[in-house]
Image (cartoon, grey):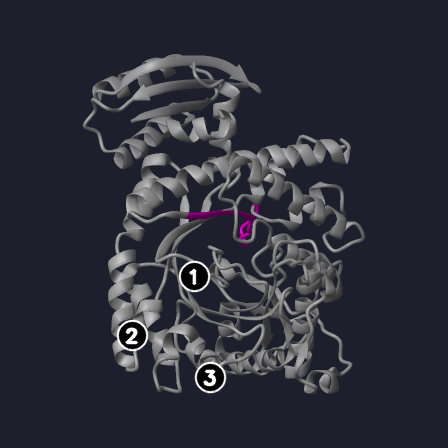
Amino acid sequence: MKAIVSVVGSDKVGIIARVSNFLADRGINIDDISQTVLEGNFVMMMMVDLSKSSAQIGPLKAELETLGESLGVSIAMMHERVFGAMHRI
Amino acid sequence: MLYTPFEIKETVDMFLRQKLDIRAITLGVSLLDCASASGSESRRRIRDKLLRIAGPLVRVGEEIETEYGIPIINKRVSVTPIALVAAASDETDYSPWAKTLDEVAKELGIDFIGGFSALVQKGIAPGDRRLIDSIPRALAGTDRVCASVNVASTKSGINMDAVKEMGRIIKEAASLSADRDGLACAKFVVFCNAPEDNPFMAGAFHGPGEGDSCLNVGVSGPGVIKAAIESCRGASFDILADTIKKTAFKITRMGQLVGSEAARRLGVPFGILDLSLAPTPEVGDSVARILEEMGLESTGTHGSTAALAMLTDMVKKGGVMASTSVGGLSGAFIPVSEDEGMVAAVRAGSLSIDKLEAMTCVCSVGLDMVAIPGDTRASTIAAIIADEMAIGMVNNKTTAVRIIPVPGKKAGDWAQFGGLLGGAPIIGVHDFSSETFIARGGRIPAPIHSFRN
């Protein structure tokens, strides 16, 4: 399955590196990545592919949240199809 | 990137900040094939069938929740109106059927099971009579069973004999649960034009015209609509309406995705998607606050009916554009105890029962979770129901009454129901009698515009 990982919060050194390393350690491939500043917030979006990863989605999301807390940002992961349903006809 | 950062942030915020959720996935199951001359045999068949079909419901709901990142708050079951199933037996008390449903609900791990119901808009059959008489005991003796009675329709008129009975039943249910502020009444709905595929409790049942089973989905999200219209302060109604419609569209598409996925995994057909702004007592999940965001100082003041009319209509329009399976009630609910903004409006004195009744002409259901004084007469409750049924009958819409005469309490006191049902200040009703009016019985004929054939 493909998922979107969103990272929102105040900017600091190493956010992309930490999140990317976290994903790489679990065999999750990053298909696409974009980063911008939206309404004064650091916003990073990643499209990731979990098909080659053995990570369970439930624990994975909890770990991402913990990682977010340690970086002072909010990290969320949702199924890609949710965004497709809402924003593409 | 396939999606823009703005689109991604908008969606993520809806779930994380604005409390968007799938309020309920409700599996409708037909029990018509569970009728038997023996009551115990009928209940055994019901139990077996429900455990077989609904067994995986909670697991599937939780899997989708985790995988998709979408909260699915309640997993529920609705069944064929029990009056139709139990009528074949010679038992006169139908509360054992409610006990069976309650036990099954607990075994399945679901919070509510709906369908301890009867459809009596035109007349009361012996099975309907027994079911109605069993409602107070059934509700007071169970935790998770919901009951409903359809007493009117645009096509048949209002069964005033049934309306009169409802006043009595509600009083009795309240007194049997007096130690819990009349909680049994919070699980009982009186309907006009009841939809057969509504996924929302307490009024959900699986209509006799439905198939063997199907999955219906109820999507909520008052917080998302409120957040969307916060960006329209000072804008004209055209812009406001368009914003609500676009937001409703997005929410519905999400519901369609979850509903069809859940139905596929359960191996049952997808029924309908009901997009209803259903508030909860939590701050940030209120329909009243949407009306206030439109520019009203407090809900219930002049302008509230117009605001609600537009809200309900735009939610429906956004919904039908997004999915061909929109059904159920779809629109906006205005329960009092389940909406902190409505509670505040009653407390502030801006919302009376009369204004509430006016607002039900344009909301998607009716008088919902309204706590009234415990000494309100049965005939007055019946008359409140008759008014609400008349609104539904004449306007070709679903209306409902879920009202709680709180034993031992008077207007201004607080009634506490707990959980999603919340609590509410008791709202005053008129003291003038409707006794002679209700005592007439009989039927109010269907309106002229029901003759469309």
Q: CA distance from mark 3 to mark 2?
A: 19 Å
Q: Is residue B152 above or below residue B199?
A: below
- How crowded pointer 3 is (Cα within 10 Å; few <14, some 14-19, many 20+) is rated as few
Residue at mark 3 shares a chain with residue at mark 2: yes
- Taking the image as shown, residue B178 lies to the left or right of residue B167, namely left
- Dot 3 corresponds to which residue? B126
* Kind of residue sitting beneath label 3: Pro
Report the side of B137 relative to B357 (left or right). Answer: left
- Residue, x 36% and y 86% (percent of image)? B91
User: Nearer the N terminus, badge 3 or badge 1?
Assistant: 3
- Secondary structure at badge 2 equals helix
In x, y percent, where is residue B22?
45, 45
* Magenta span of residues: B271-284
Tell me the residue at 46%/36% (across/down).
Answer: B254
Q: Between marks 3 and 1, how big is the CA–CA gap? A: 21 Å
Q: Is residue B78 magenta?
A: no
Asked if B320 appears above or below B411 in the picture, the reply is above
The residue at the far right in this view is B302
Say above or below: B125 vs B2.
Answer: below
Residue farthest to the front, as pictured: B453
Verify whether residue B274 appears in magenta. Answer: yes
Residue at position x 49%, y 13% from top? Answer: A36
* Pointer 2 chain: B
Badge 3 or badge 2: first in the primary sequence: 2
Q: Name the kind of residue labelled 1 in the image.
A: His
* Residue B178 to residue B144: above or below: below
Q: Earlier in the sequence, mark 1 or mark 2?
A: 2
Q: Position of residue B444 (x, y in %)?
A: 69, 75
Q: Quadrant of the C terminus of chain B?
A: bottom right
Report the residue marked by disc 1: B206
Question: Could you give the CA–CA distance between mark 1 and mark 2, rounded to whole angstroms?
Answer: 17 Å
